[in-house]
Image (cartoon, rainbow, N blue to C red):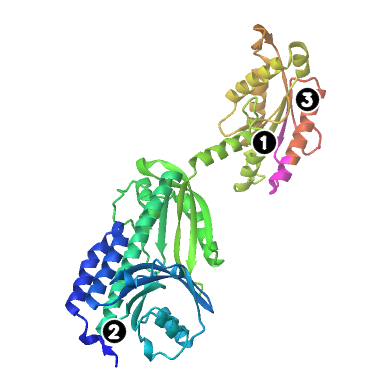
Amino acid sequence: MPESEQGRLDATKLLSALADSAGYMADQSRFTEGVKHLLALIGAATGGSRVWVFQLIELSDDAIVQDYVFEWNATSHYQQSNQRRFRFFSTLFDDPQYQQLIDQRLKGQGQSMVTHELTPGSLRTNLESQGILSMATVPIRFNGKWWGTLGIDDCQRALRWEGSGLQVLTIAAELIASGLYRQQLNSRSLQLELLHRVTDCGVWEIDLVCGELYCSQGLRRILNYPATYPHIPLRRLLACVVAEDRPPLFKRLREALQAKASDWRQDARVRVAGGALRWSEIVAEISYDDKGRPLSIAGLLIDISHRKHQEQQALTASNHDALTELLNRRGLEQHFEHLAQRPSTKKGDKRWPYLLLMDIDHFKRVNDQHGHPAGDALLCLMARRIQQVLRRQDSFARIGGEEFAVLLDQVTPDQAIELGERIRHVIDQHPFCLTIPDSHQKIELHVTLSLGLVALPDSDDPYDCQAIAIARADRALYAAKHHGRNRMVVYDSASSIA
């Protein structure tokens, strides 16, 4: 008859073995050594032939793949980990007893088996081929799942493991799981710090169930917290985001949660160490439970200041004239749009936006007589001179070869006319002195402007408003040219003539 393990195990030795091994497991750098030490102490305390750990590699409906990762044996005769058949070995579920064993391990239950008591089948045959008279096993659970199995083989005694024996093995399996967890945390920490050094980013995670926030050391340094700071409240992390950037950030998050999206991203300005503002890309991944409820949000805070700077440079280049550095036609369109987004001005108001078109008279003569470099130099000097007359809120653009435009913001009709005449006079009354490139020849040029002035039409559509305004101002400009140049004509909407 099988003996009960109750009278065979030395409980004091087993508890001492667990306590001794706990010290090894606490040091993640000695995890492998700690597992081997634990198996050896369990083997010595129980008198077993082998103590081993299998790791679960793959589980399907009809088979399981495992690997023999740790083993202690009483003598080399019992050693099996060096045998090829135990490296990533596959076992079919062709025996109901084995299928039941696997089901119990999935549920976190331990097993005790006496080989000769098993019904004939592949499980009994397998144990007999290894000379195992009795065996006890308990699952190792890691991150809430079955990770592997801790077991004892006895090739000398047919023992029935019950009560404290299986409990001790369960505690030992939990020690191994805790070592795995610490090893994972250490590895994760090292990976995160490496990621921070390589990409200049911080890592964060919010547990939506309990509200806890995790920040990597790199992120703490970015936000001017000591790397060893124990806990950063969520409200402090959010306070680092510039106030006006928080609403679009929260809006993007709400949209992702409503759509049950697994990831989302948003750009925002973040106040970092020293109080400086830094553009960052917030990249996040959302995890949900089986009912679709969000569990956590984890992500990165990536420095994109360089990218934003390049984007701003590209935007500036696309909206500005390369020669004069004034707005170009596209840049002027942006100001029309901005004007349209503001509260509409009523027709009865004294102040109204105006558009002023200007064209250099006989500019072709400058290019023909002195060359295009001289013409370019004249355009730049003229742009700077006109800018000195304009107000800060006026939008000044070069929209053609020698054609300029000014969008006047909220002026009376008299102020608009006065500003146009002032521009005309400052060009007419003061000649331009410039040096022709490559020849060092200094020349003095007297040029004049023709101008067309129009009040912006009352339209909610910025594109329609711009098109009508430019067409009307162009008609007024043409009239100024037709009537002798060096003059300004105001478009008369009542008579539809300039």
How far apart, in angstroms, are the residues tagged by discs 3 and 2?
116 Å
Residue 388, given in percent of the width and then of the height, sits at 58, 23
Residue 183, given in percent of the width and then of the height, sits at 34, 60
Mark 1 belongs to which amino acid?
A: Tyr
Residue 438's place in the image compared with 82, above or below, is above
Residue 443, given in percent of the width and then of the height, sits at 67, 8
Look at the image and tell me in which quarter the C terminus lies: top right
Mark 3 belongs to which amino acid?
A: Ala
Task: Name the disc covering residue 480, or none.
Answer: 3
Which residue is tagged 1? 354
372 relative position to 260: left or right: right
Label 2 sits on a secondary structure element that is loop
Which residue is tagged 2? 157
Name the residue at 60% across, 38% down.
Answer: 315
Depth check: give the residue in front, 379 or 406.
Answer: 379
Asked whether the residues under the numbered discs 1 and 3 touch, taking CB atoms below 8 Å apart as contact, a structural biologist would say no
Quarter-of-image position of residue 357: top right
Asked whether the residues under the numbered discs 1 and 2 touch, taking CB atoms below 8 Å apart as contact, a structural biologist would say no
Label 1 sits on a secondary structure element that is strand
Mark 2 belongs to which amino acid?
A: Arg
Residue 417's place in the image compared with 238, above or below, is above
Task: Name the disc covering residue 472, or none.
Answer: none
State the count of labels: 3
Label 3 sits on a secondary structure element that is helix
364 relative position to 194: left or right: right
92 relative position to 22: left or right: right
